[in-house]
Amino acid sequence: MTVELSADKANSTFKSKVVYTSEKIAVPNNKNEDQGEGEDIFISKPSNPTLVKAKSTGIFAMFSMAVKNFVWVFISPVVKLLSFIEQCRCSWALEKVKNRNNAKTNEEIEKYHNSVLFDENNPDEKKIFKYFLSDKKGEKPLIVLFMGNAQTHLWSDSDAGMIKLYEKLKKDNEADVLLFRVGNAIDDVKHKLFLSNDCSLSTDIVYQHSVNVLEDAISGKGIFAGHSKPSKVSFVGYSWGGGTVDKLLKEDWKRIGQNIPVAATVQIDAVNLGLYNLSTPVLNRPFHSRSHLNIFQNKYDFLNGCNQSINVAVDQSMVIADESSIHNGVDDNLEVLSTTYSFVKERVIGNK
C-alpha cells in the first residue's frame, strides 16, 4: 500500500524527507538516518501553512480493512461477554483501588501512592507510575505521559519513546512530569480466560490507579503534599496510552481537573483502551484540549491509529508514510519524538 500526497499549495520539504504542514505531516519511519552521534533528537522544526491531504490506496489496504471489519463482527460479542465476566470477577479489586485502599489521612494516601510508585532501587514492572517535580520557582505546567500496551518502567528509553520523552523533560526542568504505564493485554487475556486470578494489570485497574494519582497530584495530596496546583496540563499517549488520554479527558477530567486548562494533547497511533474495544483506533480529538497533535499510520493494518476529526485552526496531524513502519515502533521514531516534544514545548512550556 502506498500513501499518496496531494497539496493545495506548494510543499516545503526539510532534508528532502519530511513535509511539515499545519494539518498533515508525511514522515518516514527511519530511526537512525540523519542523526549524528550524540545529536539531540529533540529539535525544533519549522512549520508551514501548506495543506496536505493524505489518502490510502492499494488492494492490500482495502483487503486488510475488510478482513478486520469481518473479524470484529464475529469476535466482538465474545470479547465483550468475557470482559463483562472479568469486570465482575475484578469488581472487589476495582472498588479497593477507587478508594485508594481505604486511605483517609494524607499519610495513608502517601502509603497508597508508594504501593504503585516505580522505585529505581527496587524495580517492579507492575508499578504504575513515576514522577518528576521541577524545582523551578513559580507556577509550573504538568505534563502527563502514557506508555503503550505491555511497556513498563523497566524498558529502556531506546525501546519506549515515552520514557525518552520523560527523561528529556526532566532534564529541561521546566515542568512537572508524570509517566504512567497502562494495562497489559496478555494479562488481560489470561484473566478473561480464567487462566489467572490476578487482575492487577487489567486496563480498568491500571486506569483507575492513573486517575487517582493524577487527581492527587493536582490536589497536592499524599506524596504531592505541599506542591502547588499546575498552571496548565498537557497529555501525551502512545497506542493504548493515546486511548487512555481519550478516556480520561472524556470521562474523568471534568471531575478531577479543577478547571485547569488542557493546553495541548498528543496522541501517537492512538488505539481505544481495553481489549473489549478490539484495538479500534481513536476517531476524535480529546475533549477539553486547546490544541491537539495526532500522529498515526495510514496503512489500515490490524493495529494502528487513524486520521481523526480535528480542529484545523489549532490542531495538527502527522502521517507516517513509510511502508516499513509498524505500530510497535511508532513511538521510537525520532521524527515523531522531536515533533511531539516541539509541539508540547511551544504550547505548554514556551507559552507562559
Image (cartoon, rainbow, N blue to C red):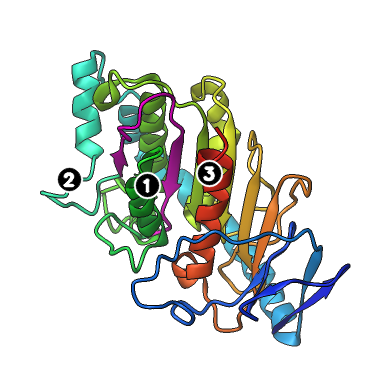
Residue placed under numbered mark 2 in the picture: 119
Whether residue 221 is visible to the viewer of this picture, yes or no, is yes
- Name the quadrant containing residue 324: bottom right
As drawn, 185 above or below 205 = below
Residue placed under numbered mark 1 in the picture: 172
Q: Is residue 56 left or right of residue 118?
A: right
Q: CA distance from mark 1 to mark 2?
A: 22 Å
The residue lying toward the viewer, choosing from 336 and 91, is: 336
Q: Nearer the viewer, mark 1 or mark 2?
A: 1
Q: CA distance from mark 3 to mark 2?
A: 24 Å
Image quarter where the C terminus lies is top right
Image quarter where the N terminus lies is bottom right
As drawn, 60 above or below 277 = below
> Which amino acid, mark 3?
Val
- Region in magenta: 129-149
Residue placed under numbered mark 3 in the picture: 245
